[in-house]
Amino acid sequence: MIRIATRRSPLAKWQANHVSQLLRDREPGLEVRLHELVTRGDKILEVPLADVGGKGLFVKEIEDALLNRDAEVAVHSMKDLPAVLAPGLVLAAVPQREDPRDALCSPRWKTLAALPKGARVGTSSLRRSAQLKALRPDLQMEMVRGNVETRLRKASEGLDAVVLAYAGLRRLGLAEHATYVFPPEEMLPAVAQGALALEARADDAPTLARLAALEDPDTRVRIEAERGFLARIEGGCQVPIAGHATLAGGKVTIRALVASLDGARVIRGERTGAYAEARAMGESLADELLSRGADQILRETEGKAPGLAAPKRG
């Protein structure tokens, strides 16, 4: 039997069930159970993640289940996974990635260009907020947390639009709510957005062997470049950071940025190289951006209020 540790949100359970099906497709008759947990990040919904510790809030309880041997596998949204894993755990497999782009959901206005001046846009992401402000300084950004369905509802209950990961909408069968999908050239995705992380104990050889069959080599190369950038830049949810890698012609290209909270300063860079150099390229690109002023943005941004207004009530 394999036990999969997962959060209880509809999207998290979809992801865990997807991995369960992949395992059972390869090993018919295998018993797979979900070990559902509520993380600290799931409990704190009224404030931005940046105020309470960032993305690691969604993984600690899940990783503890592995370390305590209450589960053999943890399934995460890769973008929630900190750059450094808990001791004793490994990123055992990276399945094929879903579309990593961001999506605008606006039943009335449909596109970013169509939003009226001063439109209220909901997001929980400083990365999205900063890039939206760079594109449209007039927009009013408001913090929106909760599961995908809750955030979609906000677009019809007072806000003019919300911005979500297109991957989550597709996985939940809600892609029709995406009225505009941002090209990466316009809004660079989060590091590892759309990818799943299958985590396991480093000493659990049978589980590692099972999960290895679910590995997608192309996705792993892209993730290595993006997470190399993240690890070197030492950023999290508290700083607007983006990184997106693509493959073409036997080469990997990573594009990345670091932005100020208000989107007034955006430092961008790009590197291309061999697959084997993916992680080193991400690290090197981080060093370049830091040398060009990203280090100053990071110093100024860390510890500051995230700049997302709390949603208005009534």
Image (cartoon, rainbow, N blue to C red):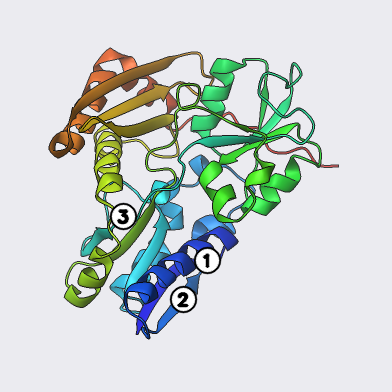
For residue 304, above or below residue 177: above
**Observer-nearest residue: 19 or 266?**
19
User: Quadrant of residue 124 in the image?
Assistant: top right
Looking at marks 3 and 2 on the same chain, the residue that comes earlier in the sequence is marked by: 2
Q: Residue at x 43, y 26 (%)?
A: 301
In terms of sequence position, does the residue under pointer 2 or pointer 1 come before the other? 1
Residue 305: tell me if it is visible. no
Q: Which residue is mark 2?
A: 34
What count of labels does the image hold?
Answer: 3
Q: Residues within 10 Å of mark 2 (few under 14, many from 20)?
A: some
**Residues at badges 2 and 1 in contact (C-beta under 8 Å)?**
yes
Q: Position of residue 297 (x, y in %)?
A: 38, 20
Q: Residue at 72% x, 39% y: name it.
A: 311
Q: Which residue is mark 1?
A: 13
Secondary structure under the numbered disc 2 in the rendered image:
strand
Estimate the spatial distance between the alpha carbons at disc 1 and disc 3, rounded to whole Å.
17 Å
Residue labelled with disc 3: 94
Q: Mark 3 against mark 2, which lies toward the viewer?
A: 3
Name which residue type carries label 2.
Leu
Secondary structure, mark 1, is helix
Q: At which x and y percent is residue 39?
A: 49, 62
Q: Nearer the viewer, residue 104 or 227?
A: 104
The residue lying furthest to the right in this view is: 314
